[in-house]
Image (cartoon, rainbow, N blue to C red):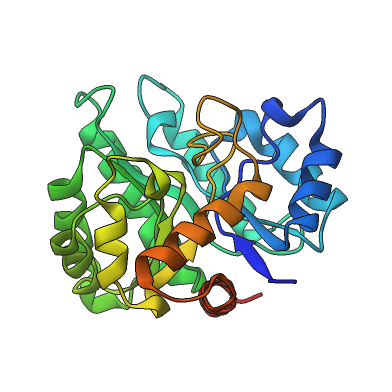
């Protein structure tokens, strides 16, 4: 059986409260051996930590403050301080990344200054703790590239989560640091340009992710996404690159091991 790694799974989300055990069992049956779980904010820490304690061999936690959790939040600096405290004393043994962090201007551009401050602080934490960043970018590519440019001489590294950019975006990110690119459900969508981009990406830079319960791949669009559907994404990446699904699984899991250190 192939060994797959879902590098971005919100399996601790309340969407799985009724059948989390079964969803994880389905993922295992599909060949998913590891799931990287991003943090969002303190509202979900309890569920994140509980899931990782129950499934320590498969569920690997990150720590960070999501950009949209900064928006309209008078306590976002307290949230950021909590991230710093938890990184210093991980309640689950260790964290595997600083994430998910970044910029999201889709809902509002009003909080760019606050999101930038939070993101830059977490970049500094990633350097301090030698942990990869898992970066969320939505409707903020120029702003993201400007921030990464400030840190490119400091050895930044990580993952561009749910990458849906162009080849120019891919190359621009690679000029800023040691980055890989999370490819998820959108690569399977009928009108997506991603397969053509993936075809030209170096396999050593590709990771697979579901972002479940969000962004389900074809043929599950309109339904709750889950980590077992990673096989659909693996198959589409293999098709785009003209190689076997086994080779994609093997290489993307090796990439994940290298980046996250598990």
Residue at x 30% of width, y 68% of height: 199
Q: Residue 125 at x, y = what percent?
A: 44, 61
**Rendered residue at 19%/56% (across/down):** 166
Indicate the position of residue 219 as horizontal and vertical percent values.
53, 38
User: Which of these two is toward me, 27 or 117?
Assistant: 27
In the image, is residue 191 above or below residue 142?
Answer: above
| Camera-nearest residue between 188 and 90 | 188
Q: Is residue 6 visible?
A: yes
- Is residue 260 something one can see in this rendering? no
Q: Which sits in the foreground, 219 or 23?
A: 219
Q: Position of residue 228 (x, y in %)?
A: 68, 49
User: Where on the picture, by quarter, is residue 226?
Assistant: top right
Q: What residue is at 70 percent from the left and 42 percent from the top?
A: 48
Numbered marks: total: 0
| Quadrant (top left, top right, bottom left, bottom right) of the C terminus | bottom right
**Residue 213: image x %, image y %?**
59, 34
Compared across the picture, whether 256 is left or right of 115 comes to right
Question: In the rendered view, would you say 74 is above or below 8?
Answer: above
Q: Residue at x 81, y 59 (%)?
A: 56
Please indicate whether residue 40 sits to the left or right of residue 19 in the image.
left
In this image, 237 relative to 199: left or right? right
> Which quarter of the figure is the N terminus placed in?
bottom right
């Amino acid at each position: 059986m192939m060994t797959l790694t879902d590098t971005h799974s919100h399996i601790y989300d309340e969407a799985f409260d009724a059948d989390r055990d079964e969803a994880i069992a389905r993922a295992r049956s599909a060949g998913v051996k590891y799931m990287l779980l991003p943090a969002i904010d303190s509202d979900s820490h309890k569920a994140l930590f509980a899931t990782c304690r129950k499934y320590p061999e498969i569920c690997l936690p990150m720590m960070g403050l999501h950009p949209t959790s900064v928006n309209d939040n008078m306590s976002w600096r307290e949230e950021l301080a909590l991230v710093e405290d938890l990184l210093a004393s991980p309640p689950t043994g260790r964290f595997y990344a600083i994430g998910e962090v970044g910029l999201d201007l889709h809902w509002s551009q009003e909080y760019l200054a606050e999101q930038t401050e939070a993101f830059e602080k977490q970049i500094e934490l990633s350097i301090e703790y030698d942990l990869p960043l898992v970066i969320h970018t939505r409707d903020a590519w120029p702003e993201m590239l400007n921030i990464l440019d400030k840190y490119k001489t400091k050895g930044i590294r990580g993952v561009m989560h749910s990458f849906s950019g162009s080849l120019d975006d891919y190359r621009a990110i690679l000029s800023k640091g040691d980055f890989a690119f999370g490819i998820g459900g959108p690569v399977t969508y009928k009108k997506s340009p991603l397969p053509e981009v993936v075809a030209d990406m170096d396999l050593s830079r590709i990771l697979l992710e579901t972002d479940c319960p969000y962004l389900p791949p074809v043929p599950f669009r309109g339904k709750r996404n889950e980590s077992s559907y990673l096989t659909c994404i693996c198959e589409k990446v293999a098709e785009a690159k003209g190689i076997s699904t086994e080779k994609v699984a093997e290489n993307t899991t090796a990439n994940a091991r290298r980046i996250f250190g598990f």
